[in-house]
Image (spheres, grey):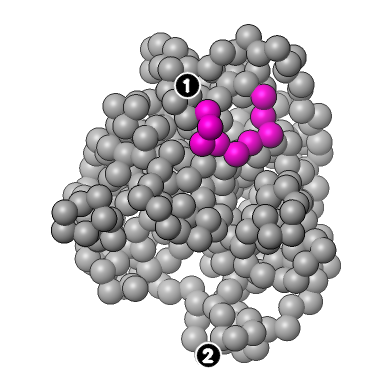
């Protein structure tokens, strides 16, 4: 979702009065092995739910794009952008939590881009505040009078060891309008999904999501439901769908005349974004993104191998980071499959499993 905002911002009125400020490339930093101790009780049940056994993922979905091997270490210098999707509903409501958190990692030497999805329930230390889930950080900053994106950027830096150059955040309403302005996006759907969502804009008070397998054209409302669905009952599954949507947006914007379309699109979205990027900076960023070949786009979801399910005070189910495993995953970022690709050997849950997930 946020990638669209990044591209549109820079392509609109790119002759900005402020000169483009090249972000200083910084060596990737390993995640500190000293993670603040968290008083966590032994979990009564795993917070990482496993999908129910079912049919294998449809073979009609293309296999992940094969990529050339990258020298070790996979990258030496990166430019990292924080992309945030906020839980604010188009019709009002929503707590404004950062329920989509993605770091876009640009590697200059290899001209590759990797998307790293961070679980919203990751248990982190918030500088100057108590420990909490990472999706609460921006709200903590708002209540304390701090810059929300700056504080979230610091937490991400401390957690992943990836210094953040710039940040951008959008909410669900902006995302829906943006996708519709593009005429929709095409997304590879590997598993059938049946779900429903509260939406007072529909006379029934609900909207139904009913998707088959295949390369499907989604409008804004459908794309937002696909990104939010609890199908598979795991935030890790949802993060992969969100990456697939980002890839679909990038494909749409890469079509002929896309910068002109994005320029017109942003004209109606300017007041709805939170970012520290100038228009000129994002125009240059968009050009860099379009120069990256599909074979050099990679996606990593920090999942069950990089976090452990724990129980915090009050019985809250949270995810504690595993620093060594996160470091290893980041070292292999640019040999990861295309963004949104299902895990090898994974199976599809029942199509309507999300209806029972709460």
Q: Is residue 222 above or below residue 255?
A: below
What label does residue 16 carry, if any?
A: none
Q: Is residue 240 visible?
A: no
Circle 1/circle 2 CB separation < 8 Å? no
Quarter location, residue 10: top right
Judged from this view, the residue extending furthest toward the left is 204
What label does residue 44 carry, if any?
A: 2
Is residue 159 left or right of 311 when viewed as pictured? right
- What residue appears at the point 62 percent right and 21 percent down from the top-left corner? 279
* Residues packed near mark 2 inside 10 Å, few (<14), some (14 to 19) or many (20 plus): few
Is residue 285 left or right of 272 when viewed as pictured? right
Q: Work out whether residue 291 or residue 194 is closer to the camera in this orientation and state it.
A: 194
Q: Where is residue 118 drawn, in percent x and y?
A: 58, 55
Instruction: Tell me the CA gap for discs 1 and 2.
Output: 50 Å
Q: Work out whether residue 9 or residue 294 is closer to the camera in this orientation and state it.
A: 9
Q: Is residue 243 magenta-colored?
A: no
Q: Is residue 32 above or below residue 108?
A: below
Image quarter where the C terminus lies is bottom left
Magenta residue span: 270-278
Number of callouts in the render? 2
Nearer-N-terminus badge (1/2): 2
* Residues packed near mark 1 inside 10 Å, few (<14), some (14 to 19) or many (20 plus): few
Tag 1 secondary structure:
helix
- What residue appears at the point 16 percent right and 54 percent down from the top-left corner? 203
Depth check, mark 1 against mark 2: the one in front is 1
What label does residue 267 carry, if any?
A: 1
Q: Where is residue 283 drawn, in percent x and y?
A: 60, 19
- What residue appears at the point 74 percent right and 54 percent down from the top-left corner? 145
Q: Is residue 181 visible?
A: yes
């Amino acid at each position: 979702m946020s990638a669209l905002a990044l591209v549109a911002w820079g392509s609109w009125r790119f002759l900005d009065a402020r000169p483009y400020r090249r972000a200083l490339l910084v060596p990737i930093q390993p995640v500190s092995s000293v993670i603040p101790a968290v008083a966590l009780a032994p979990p009564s049940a795993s917070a990482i739910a496993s999908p129910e056994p079912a049919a294998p993922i449809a073979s009609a979905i293309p296999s992940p794009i094969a990529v050339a091997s990258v020298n070790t270490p996979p990258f030496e210098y990166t430019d990292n952008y924080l992309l945030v999707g906020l839980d604010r509903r188009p019709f009002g409501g929503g707590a404004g939590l950062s329920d989509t958190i993605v770091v876009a990692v640009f590697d200059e030497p290899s001209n590759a881009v990797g998307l790293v999805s961070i679980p919203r329930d990751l248990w982190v230390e918030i500088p100057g505040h108590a420990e909490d889930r990472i999706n609460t950080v921006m709200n903590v900053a708002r209540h304390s009078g701090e810059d929300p994106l700056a504080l979230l950027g610091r937490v991400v830096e401390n957690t992943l060891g990836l210094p953040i150059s710039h940040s951008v955040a959008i909410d669900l309403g902006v995302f829906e309008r943006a996708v519709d302005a593009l005429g929709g996006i095409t997304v590879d759907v590997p598993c059938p999904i049946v779900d429903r969502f509260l939406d007072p804009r529909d006379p029934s008070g609900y909207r139904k999501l009913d998707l088959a397998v295949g390369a499907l054209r989604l409008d804004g409302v459908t794309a937002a439901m696909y990104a939010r669905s609890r199908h598979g009952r795991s935030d890790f599954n949802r993060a992969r769908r969100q990456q697939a949507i980002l890839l679909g947006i990038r494909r749409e914007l890469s079509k002929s005349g896309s910068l002109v379309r994005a320029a017109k699109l942003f004209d109606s979205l300017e007041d709805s974004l939170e970012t520290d990027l100038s228009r000129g900076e994002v125009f240059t960023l968009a050009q860099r993104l379009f120069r990256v070949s599909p074979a050099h786009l990679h996606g990593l979801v920090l999942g069950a191998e990089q976090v452990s399910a724990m129980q915090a005070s009050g019985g809250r189910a949270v995810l504690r980071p595993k620093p060594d495993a996160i470091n290893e995953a980041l070292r292999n970022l640019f040999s990861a499959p295309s963004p949104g690709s299902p895990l090898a050997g994974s199976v599809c849950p029942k199509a309507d499993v999300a209806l029972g997930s709460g």
